[in-house]
Amino acid sequence: MRRLPPCLLSGFCTLLLAAGLHAQTPGAQLVDVITQPVSIKNLSTRIEALGTLRANESITLTPNVTKTVTRINFEDGQRVAKGQVLVEMTSREESALLEEARFNTDEARKQLDRVDALVKRGAASHALLDQRVREYEAARARYNATESRLKDLILLAPFNGVVGLRNVSVGALVSPGDQITTLNDDSRMKLDFTVPAIYMRNLTVGLSIEAKSDDLGGKIFKGKVFSIDNQIDQVTRAITVRALLDNPRHELKQGMLMLVNLNAAEREAMVISESALVPLGSNNFVFVVHDQDGDRVLERRQITIGERLAGAVEVLNGLTPGEKLVTHGLQKVRGGQKVSVIAEEKSVAEQQSGEASSLSDLLTQKKH
């Protein structure tokens, strides 16, 4: 349903007030006003931020030794599985050394078993047995070291993911630090964004967020806050928050800029119309209507406000739900004055629920 513009409501209320004044008798001292009840509404603090996407896991594939590339087992942008061989380098020398180390280890083991049998029969000394144990352990250590060097010549995928662009070719001599390619696990994405420190008390792990990017046509992705940094930036006075977004279709890419929206500090709060507020310096006041001996009398009361909404204000203290406040006719009233309530607006909660679409909806009753 279509909501009535505030300017039309204000003009209509002015006409009602004028009509009420003309209807009074010449000696009447009552001022015509329009009131509204204090209502309860579910609120949340809306926070907007800009964030940058990162892959759930991301590495740069580089060699550990200086060797020649003999085989490349992936294509640009290919999806690979954990443990899959990506790059192989020259390994003939290491393979020969490994075979030699294996032979020496097996021979040392045979000598150890032979001496151990002799010692048990009393035909050899324990000193000789200790020597054979040392020889065997040294041979096994050389075998393990050679095997480790051979493994360094084969680069495996440490996790499932997608590789980036290939930067080397078969036959290229590569050294430690040379970038062969990148590997990203994009099944889930980390979204890092900063939030002003004043909102820190509203942030909790598990808080739901929504993020979108113009690069994807404004499509909304939902996620949850995963972690909050342990320090505030001294320059920007902001804290970094990390959220996780599922990425089943692999649409999100590392480095993408995202607009983040999150609703924090969900609560039930008292709300009043902004038109009922009378600011005075740093303080805020309202006029509350009371029944006194059959008359309507005003009380000027100071309140504490919280978050400002569209056409409404959150009240932290100073009022109770259901109390009637003057929203129109404030220019002519003062504390302790008797008034005539000519109409009553629906509460802010009812108006913002979308039910009010006409003047009769916004003004629930009219009194002469």
Image (spheres, rainbow, N blue to C red):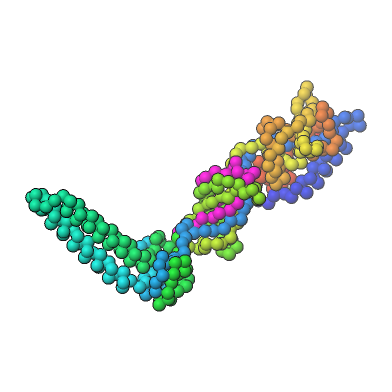
Look at the image and tell me in which quarter the C terminus lies.
Answer: top right
Q: Residue at image x 73%, y 33%?
A: 303
> Would residue 173 be seen by someone viewing this image from the given angle?
yes
Membership of 338 in magenta stretch: no
Where residue 175 sits, quadrant-wise, is bottom left
Residues shaded magenta: 186-209
Residue 219, percent across and down?
Answer: 56, 60
Residue at 16% over, 49% down: 126
Is residue 269 rendered to the left or right of residue 112? right
Q: Nearer the viewer, residue 197 or 128?
A: 128
Q: Quick one: 174 or 51, which is closer to the camera?
A: 174
Is residue 75 shown above or below 288?
below
Q: Along the line of sight, which residue is nearer the eye, 177 or 261?
A: 177
Expressed as whole percent of the image width and height from the top left, the position of residue 200 reads 60, 43
Picture residue at 18% right of the left edge, 58% below the top? 109
Residue 36 at x, y = what percent? 73, 37
Residue nearest the viewer, comparing 220 with 296: 220
Instruction: Tell me: 20 left or right of 1.
Output: right
